[in-house]
Image: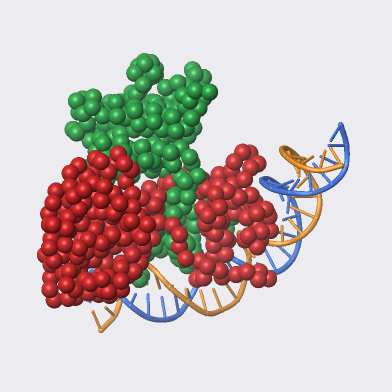
Chain colours: A green, B red, C blue, D orange
Amino acid sequence: MPAVSDTEAGAGASVQSVDRALTILEMLAREGEAGVTEIAAELGVHKSTAFRLLATLEAHRLVEQDGDRGRYRLGVGNLRLAGATTARLDLVTEARPVCRQLATDTGETVNITVRSETSALYLDQVAGSSALQSHNWVGQHIPLHATSNGKVLISELTEAELKRAVRELPRLTDRTVTRRAELKSQLDHIREVGYAVAVDELEVGLTAAAAPIRNAHGDIVASMSISGPTFRLTHERLERDVPLLTAAATEVSHRLGWGQRV
Amino acid sequence: MPAVSDTEAGAGASVQSVDRALTILEMLAREGEAGVTEIAAELGVHKSTAFRLLATLEAHRLVEQDGDRGRYRLGVGNLRLAGATTARLDLVTEARPVCRQLATDTGETVNITVRSETSALYLDQVAGSSALQSHNWVGQHIPLHATSNGKVLISELTEAELKRAVRELPRLTDRTVTRRAELKSQLDHIREVGYAVAVDELEVGLTAAAAPIRNAHGDIVASMSISGPTFRLTHERLERDVPLLTAAATEVSHRLGWGQRV
DNA sequence: GCAATTGGTTGCGCATCACGCAACGGTGGG
DNA sequence: CCCACCGTTGCGTGATGCGCAACCAATTGC
């Protein structure tokens, strides 16, 4: 009898073996790669069990192993699934060409995010021309108060909605906004100018600017951002890039039916 | 007794329920969305079984349902997994074994390039078996309009992107394409047939053919080429080698998550 | 406006199937 | 050269995943 059961995502999950297999995927997403024994230990099951789960995942290309008898890591099947996931979201489909253009124009990384409960969910990313892909944010949930995207996403919420979306303001760097009053005055400013900037608020050395994407009703449904190292995204660079950003976000809004004369 | 068994990916997959769950994901990737009954029928299991598998997938956010009792579709959890997959995915590493195979099959030099602003950047090279060696291109930036690789890389750009990427068309040999209209008609042709050929356009005596490498979204992210002396890469030789080239490029695309398998 | 059909959801009990066990083969380190 | 470790595989058992049937909600047709 396994003492460990309904942990985290496992709640409500009826099929044990599937639950375990999916937990393996999440482990690999977190840790990069792992061996059978290691996975079995973390899952609290026998080696052979973990091995069979891995074999099944491998048959669907969701994991692959290093050599013939090596460690396991995530496989390309995930990319196909993600491609199909985003293809379904017309937001991403419409935004993608615009993002590519913005990425080449500014040379920085472009992201598309939506609000998911109390966090910003990163849906898509186009790497800037600046050689090294900094970090892939896709699929991650980030606190709303600590990023330019997040602030844009909550900038037009009602008082009650805001209270629900931002319950606490944990400090992530020493530039993170942690006082509610300050956050609110920043949101006022964002509504006024139509974009948000965050310097070193999520990670030290990371600067980002974001602008809202609206649907046909004028609601903010998503946010588009450019981000890069603070040393490169100086005040002067932002003065050049922010107008490009807001124009791109507006373009996507138009494609979603915003501002069309009826 | 389930008449349908070890189909497609199921071969070698030991854990039945996991195999079924993953098959559901693939179904949803293919069809966009589906209901419990529909899924159960296609899987050859009872409704309740399909439902429990879906519930488990939903707990891990790999699927989500439309309303409270609606149809099912792929969920955002896939994005997270894909983000973690790309983080460790390296174009050169994935392409290298395929390049080696292509080099031995054709006997010519194989190159991998990506677009870097207004030029093609050579990332990797595998020398062909043929004694006569061309020099090593790795690390070099070459004008986009003068090589087969470059033309592939710009073949699906929008009008605006193309304008920015190819500002001028300097003449490098007397076969170099220097008229914008001609370049565009060549790009039309490349899109149609799926590969590009350049004879004596970069250097006199150098012929190359290139084919696109795509990511999970279908975007052209890189180009693969074979190149050799013009006297050897005759029309007949190309007729034999180009199918090998396009097959190899497609194989790499698959390794990067590009769809359409089998 | 009601009946009928469709489609997602849930408790139950049996048999299957997934699990733990133990042994194997390859690899790397002492 | 042996030992320890790790991925892999056949086997027997019982936990578990499955089919069944009934339930409920929504939509359709009369």
Which residue does the image show at 65% across and 62% down from the upper left?
B44
Which residue does the image show at 23% across and 43% down from the upper left?
B165
Left/right of residue A245 with respect to residue B177 in the rendered view: right
Relative image position of residue A151 (x, y in whole percent): 38, 26
Q: Residue A185 sits in which quadrant? A: top left
Left/right of residue A59 with respect to residue C14 in the rendered view: left
Q: Nearer the viewer, residue A81 or B182?
A: B182
Relative image position of residue B169 (x, y in whole percent): 17, 47
Q: Is residue A48 visible?
A: yes
Relative image position of residue B122 (x, y in whole percent): 19, 56
Relative image position of residue C18 (x, y in whole percent): 56, 63
Instruction: Report the quarter where the N terminus of chain A lies.
Output: bottom right
Left/right of residue A81 with respect to residue A99 in the rendered view: right
Q: Residue B45 sits in which quadrant? A: bottom right
Left/right of residue A228 with respect to residue A56 in the rendered view: left
Q: Nearer the viewer, residue B24 or A254?
A: A254
Which residue does the image show at 62% across and 55% down from the upper left?
B39
Which residue does the image show at 29% across and 41% down from the upper left?
B161
Q: Nearer the viewer, residue A246 or A44?
A: A246
Q: Is residue A39 visible?
A: no
Compared to residue A167, the image places residue B195 above or below, namely below
Compared to residue B229, the image places residue B41 above or below, namely above
